[in-house]
Image (cartoon, rainbow, N blue to C red):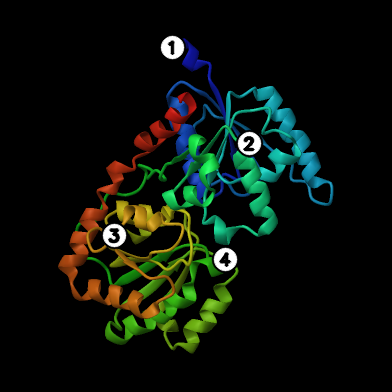
Amino acid sequence: MGIHRLMKKITFLIGSLGGGGAERVTVALADYFCESGYEVFFIVFSKVNNNYEINPKIKVDYLPENTGKSAIFLRIKELKRILKNQEPDYVISLGLGYQYLILGNLLNKYKFILSERNAPQFFYNWYEKIYVKYSYKKAYRVVFQTEDAKQYFGKNLEKKSKVIANPITSSIPNPYDGVREKRIVAVNRLSQQKNLLMLLRAMKRVFDIFPEYILEIYGKGEQQEELEKYAKELKIFDNVKFMGQKANVQKYIVNAGVFVSSSDYEGMSNSMLEAMAIGLPVVCTDCPIGGARMVIKNNINGILTPVGDDKKFADAIIDLLSNPKKADKLGKNASLLREKLSVEIIAKKWEKLLKD
């Protein structure tokens, strides 16, 4: 059994080694498989800045950075060549490159384990929905982050699909136990999906009562200018700081007062999980596709509010700032997720998929 297992090869398709939730999960899973006696390969789609430290045992290949009309076909050709050389037993892709797999007819050649990383009803346009559904139909196994996402794709995937939450990596700081700073923090891409305009409206209500607090928004994205302008219109610009993207952002936010997530839809937010794991009191929209609801028990280890409702969102933050003991209790309960969703526990569920 041991020798047989040593020979198993797994290839991970990964967008880049430069950041992003799906990539972080991929790196964590790959490291586990490496240390459990598998031969592990990465095929990386983009060479942008490498922020992740990856296990030196992982063999890395990059797809060419072609542009132009024939680019996708050149990259598919290279993808096929790399896979042929690697001869993997399994190929794992977290929401990446499905059109490559279809156009290259690769789903029939290898055992693909694919994973849905967002709320499919909002995230994909009509033709993406077609090729994603087709990919899942052809895949060896499909992993969903939530039960709702699994239900969305219907009964025909029942036998080969599994719900597995995201792991929480062990590299994050320990929960903070001390006086919290007067900061409210958000960590996400500055894009429409995250509904940061609603967050700013909610914060106006909060600042009316707690003017000494500031909101720090970590991340970058196409909406930054619009958000800065809106903060000025709401006359809260002096209380809002755009912090940009930070590697290991958890160390910057560990002693903040409250973590907030205002998304309209989301897969399972890594920044939310990590905020909970470092013991932050969390206020989060109860958004599709149910990732927040899967881990937050309302008023026990966090607070859930209706999507798009800035008044209820503000009320939840005000409640925590007015009741430090409650905030403290929620944060302590939230930090228990650290054990429950450790990389080892989650990766073992992925490993079981290979064997079932």
Which mark is first along the chain, 4 or 1? 1
Circle 1 crowding by C-alpha within 10 Å: few under 14, some 14–19, many from 20: few
Residue at image mark 2: 138
Asked whether, in this view, residue 336 is left or right of residue 275, the answer is: left
CB under 8 Å between discs 2 and 4: no
CA distance separating discs 2 and 4? 34 Å
Say which of marks 1 and 4 sits in front: 1
Camera-near label (1 vs 3) is 1
Question: Alpha carbon of mark 2 to alpha carbon of mark 1: how far?
Answer: 29 Å
Pointer 2: residues within 10 angstroms few (<14), some, or many (20+)? Answer: some
Q: Secondary structure at mark 3?
A: loop
User: Outermost residue, right direction?
Assistant: 69
The CA span between labels 3 and 4 is: 24 Å
Q: Secondary structure at mark 2?
A: helix
Say which residue appears at 51% left-offset and 44% top-offset: 155
Q: Which residue is mark 4?
A: 221
Q: Secondary structure at mark 4?
A: loop
Q: Earlier in the sequence, mark 2 or mark 1?
A: 1
Image spot of residue 117 (x, y percent): 52, 50
Which residue is disc 3 drawn over? Answer: 280
Tag 4: amino acid: Gly
* 336 relative position to 45: left or right: left
Which numbered disc flags the more N-terminal residue, 1 or 3?
1
In the rendered structure, which disc, 2 or 4, sits on the residue that comes first in sequence? 2
